[in-house]
Image: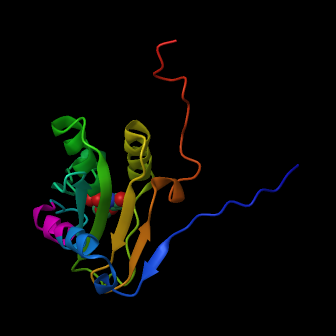
């Protein structure tokens, strides 16, 4: 038996103003994306903004459904929108934020496992890292420079989908 220690790296910022100008812009776009959240059941809005190489920013928000599992998280709404509209685009970075009137969100809200798996697939497809920023409107921001730091044990099977 071997016990293996895995290191992941993330950056913690006390406030959005500590980020670069372009990351600040992405965070404020993710806040703007909250406006289109359709979340009458959870009353929990999530907004995502994704920056493509070349600078284009694509927004997404959570879209709920009366049949609860039919809804979709903000991250996947934005990612699948890119996959279907700009299939050859390369994603540089994405920012995620959340808001609810039910309670105060005091820490950055991190993505669910399903969204992480989809982020990992985009990173694998484009063969370059995607930076992910979790932005708490109240202050703290977390940033990783690759989805690998969020999902080191994501599902990987390179033979699936290969032509051989
Ligand atoms: N939600 C997201 O949009 N992203 C996540 O990564 C986790 C949760 C949404 C789904 C649902 O509309 C609401 O947050 C409450 O779970």
- Residue 21 painted magenta: no
Relative to residue 117, is residue 153 drawn left or right? Answer: right
Quadrant of the rendered image holding ligand 1: bottom left
Is 22 rendered above or below residue 57? Answer: below
Residue positioned 36% across, 67% down in the render:
133
Is 21 rendered above or below residue 26? Answer: below
Give the percent coordinates (x, y) of residue 132: 38, 62
Farthest front residue in view: 54
Farthest top residue in view: 164
- Residue 32 painted magenta: yes
Residue positioned 27% across, 81% down in the render:
137
For the stretch drawn in magenta, what is the main secondary structure? helix
Farthest left residue in view: 35
Give the percent coordinates (x, y) of residue 129: 42, 51
Residue positioned 19% across, 62% down in the render:
39
Farthest right residue in view: 1
Q: Quadrant of residue 90?
A: top left
Give the percent coordinates (x, y) of residue 95: 29, 65
- How many numbered circles does the render carry? 0
Relative to residue 88, is residue 1 drawn left or right? Answer: right
Q: Quadrant of residue 32?
A: bottom left
Is 112 rendered above or below residue 141? Answer: above
Q: Which residues are magenta?
A: 29-37
Q: Quadrant of residue 7?
A: bottom right
Residue nearest the viewer, comparing 98 with 83? 83
Residue nearest the viewer, comparing 74 with 95? 95
Give the percent coordinates (x, y) of residue 87: 23, 35
* Colour convention of the picture: rainbow
Relative to residue 81, is residue 35 drawn left or right? Answer: left
């Amino acid at each position: 038996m071997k016990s293996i220690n895995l290191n992941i790296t993330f950056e913690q910022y006390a406030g959005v103003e500590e980020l670069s100008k372009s990351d600040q812009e992405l965070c404020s776009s993710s806040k703007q994306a909250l406006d289109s959240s359709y979340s009458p059941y959870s009353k929990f809005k999530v907004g995502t903004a994704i920056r493509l190489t070349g600078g284009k920013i694509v927004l997404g928000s959570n879209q709920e459904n009366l049949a609860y599992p039919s809804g979709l998280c903000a991250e996947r709404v934005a990612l699948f929108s890119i996959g279907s509209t700009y299939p050859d685009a390369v994603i540089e970075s994405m920012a995620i934020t959340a808001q609810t009137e039910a309670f105060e969100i005091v820490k950055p809200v991190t993505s669910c496992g399903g969204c992480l798996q989809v982020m990992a697939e985009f990173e694998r497809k484009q063969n370059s890292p995607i930076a992910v920023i979790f932005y708490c409107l109240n202050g703290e921001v977390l940033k990783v420079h690759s989805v690998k730091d969020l999902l080191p044990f994501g599902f990987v099977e390179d033979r699936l989908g290969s032509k051989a």
